Image (cartoon, grey):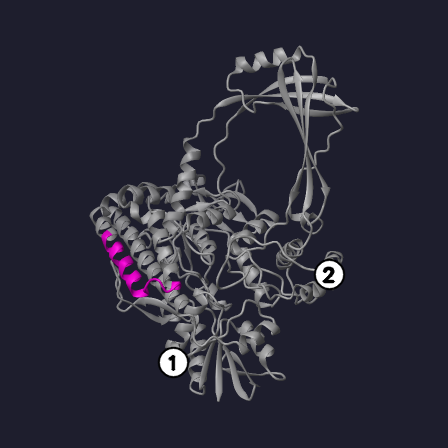
Amino acid sequence: MVTLIIAEKPNVARKIAYALAEGKPVRKTIGKVSYYEFTRDGKKVIVAPAVGHLFSLAPKTKTYGYPVFDIEWVPVYVAEKGKSYAKDYIKALATLAKKADEFIVACDYDTEGEVIGYTALKYACGVDPSKAKRMKFSALTKKDLLKAWYNLEPTINFGMADAGIARHVLDWYWGVNLSRALTSAIKRASGKWMVLSTGRVQGPTLKFLVEREKEIQNFKPKPYWVIKMILEKNNSQYTATYEKDKIWDEEEAKRIVSEAKKGPAFVEKVEVKQQKRNPPVPFDLGTLQREAYSAFGYSPKKTLELAQRLYERGLSSYPRTSSQKLPKNLNFRSILQNLAKLPEYKPFAHELLGKGTLKPVEGKKEDPAHPAIYPTGELPKPGELTKDEQNLYDLIVRRFLALFMEPAVRESMRVIINSNGHRFILSGARTLKEGWLKVYGKYVKFDEVILPQFKEGEPVKVIQIKREKKKTKPPARYSPAAVIKKMEDLGIGTKATRAQILETLYQRGYIEGKKKIKVTPLGMRVVEALEKNVPDIVSVELTRAFEEKMEEIMAGKAKRDEVIEESKEQLIKILKVFKEKELDIGKMLLETTSKDSVKVEKSSGLSGTSSRSGASKGENAKPSESSRKRLVLGKCPKCGGDLVLKYNRKTGKRFVGCSNWPKCNVTYPILQRGEVIPTGKTCCNGAPVVKIREKGREYEICLDMNCKEWKR
């Protein structure tokens, strides 16, 4: 009896093998792929890895127009360039499957993991997926993996698999067809080939960013006045603010100041309140991403990547979860005993171990697949973690420790000062009891404004009463973390896909700014053109409706094929309208693309699908020359053509050349490092000035090497 376990990635396969083996597993290879053999309970067991998705969707026949719906699952290296590494893993699984009598899927337990396992079984192993069993775990510790081995699910989770397959099909249908439609619209309006893209989730996400951008652009600041009282007590000065935070009329502000200055000023009332602040709830992925952005400035995508690496090392639980509840059977005491071995956590863990019972604070959100994120109790080896990994690990551990600690107690003081009938408020706050802030306070900001004692009726020594003119500010731009929260609130995308969708908008050149997101003119125009002509493409409601359908598939309340067919019919209607208005859409898009650069990538447009590829060098392969040569930097001073960023086919080095080559031979050298951004300015002999963004620095250069002001 030979059992083949399919893991999602090579390092996870190794973890599983070492956890389950009676003794030490034997590492073997097929080509470049390592797998493991051992015995367990009298069985011969083989653990072999995938590298994320080994199979992807592609058209059955090569077509260039739209719509296209006749698609099939093919090896990922056939569907996408740069993924030839997957060929070795498919071959290894196919070879090992011939030796196996029993199959077990041990990929991550979520919709993507189920699709990876399902397609590997069906297309690589040639096995009916219904014949395979399932290991279900939320952490890669020996204890969790042994528990999963002895409690095998009889089949894979077909609700998850069907929902995942439906998502892939829908995202392919919408992403590819809509992207082809946009590209066709530009071609029809201009005769030029320029790739643009959108997707089922990408469009609505960009739409709410555009709405915020328009609010900012259309915002007209309105003047107002604030009135402040500077007072003195015990040789220290304090600032109280007028009871109305904004005075819209300057004359009224002048009158209030004039009257208040006459005094006398005295303490009318003192309000002191104490309030318990409970510990924060356990991390789900969204709150982890927001907290990591706040604490370290990490993008949501980076946080997910770091959390995934901690999970694969067995240091923390599975990150793609929407739960804020910990497992009921989790051995909290054992985890704390291990964390106490690390000096930075020792005093907090010992304090908790002294408690009779350990009951964590929990939130309301649940996830049927995985619990909230928690440290497993396995400890990192010295020097094992990078600085970023260590930061995130510290955040997760301290959050976990805080769950069991006493509430913090905060005291707020509100002193109401009356000066000739006008009231001013002096506010203070302080922490009376640290509680959970002892361990988690480094990641929480509470103002500590300690005021002296005030008694009602006592006179107040006023130093100054003044008015200050201010202007209302436009709504703030979204941060990356705020975008993820907004997507959660709107019900679009999933916990696993949202960070990648945001990253795609950056890659397409639709948004810019890593801390405060600004929509580019191209992003604005894409949404405006679609909203005016085919609004369903950027409809939040339509996207959310299909997200809900996929949840129903997972729960067994809807059928995969019916949801796919419904989506297809909806898209056919949308594309019919698009074709009728294609020229108008193209003209609207052309108004921007003729002036602004377009980041171009040959892409399937799968903006709503989680990118779960393996940690192979192949996944980061450079784009082909044809897919990256259309970054327009300016006009050619010789012939008027476009000066575009090009790459030498032999060396891979980049340079700037005229789009009318070989008729026009104008070229310029360009620095090989950093992002190149057009400025619209010209310098020597009509040469463009470009901005180079590199390692946090930005500077402008003239492309003419003979320019005396080369670095501007």
- The numbered dot on residue 244 is none
Q: Front-most of 475 and 454?
A: 454
Q: Point out residue 314 in the picture as x, y percentages from the top left corner.
A: 60, 68
Can the viewer see residue 384? yes
Q: Earlier in the sequence, mark 1 or mark 2?
A: 1
Q: Point out residue 484 in the picture as x, y percentages from the top left corner.
A: 48, 50
Name above or below for residue 427 compared with residue 82. Answer: above
Q: Would you name the residue on which mark 2 appears?
A: 353
Label 2 amino acid? Leu
Labels 1 and 2 touching (C-beta < 8 A):
no
Q: Would you name the residue on which mark 1 appears?
A: 127
Image-quadrant location for residue 494 = bottom left
Image-quadrant location for residue 67 = bottom left
| Dominant SS in magenta | helix
Q: Residue at x 50, y 37 (%)?
A: 476
Question: Can residue 704 be found in the magenta stretch?
Answer: no
Q: Which residues are magenta?
A: 554-573
Circle 2: is it few (<14), some (14-19), or many (20+) Cα within 10 Å? some
Q: Tell me if 288 is positioned left or right of 570 in this view.
A: right
Label 1 amino acid? Val
Q: Front-most of 149 and 584?
A: 149
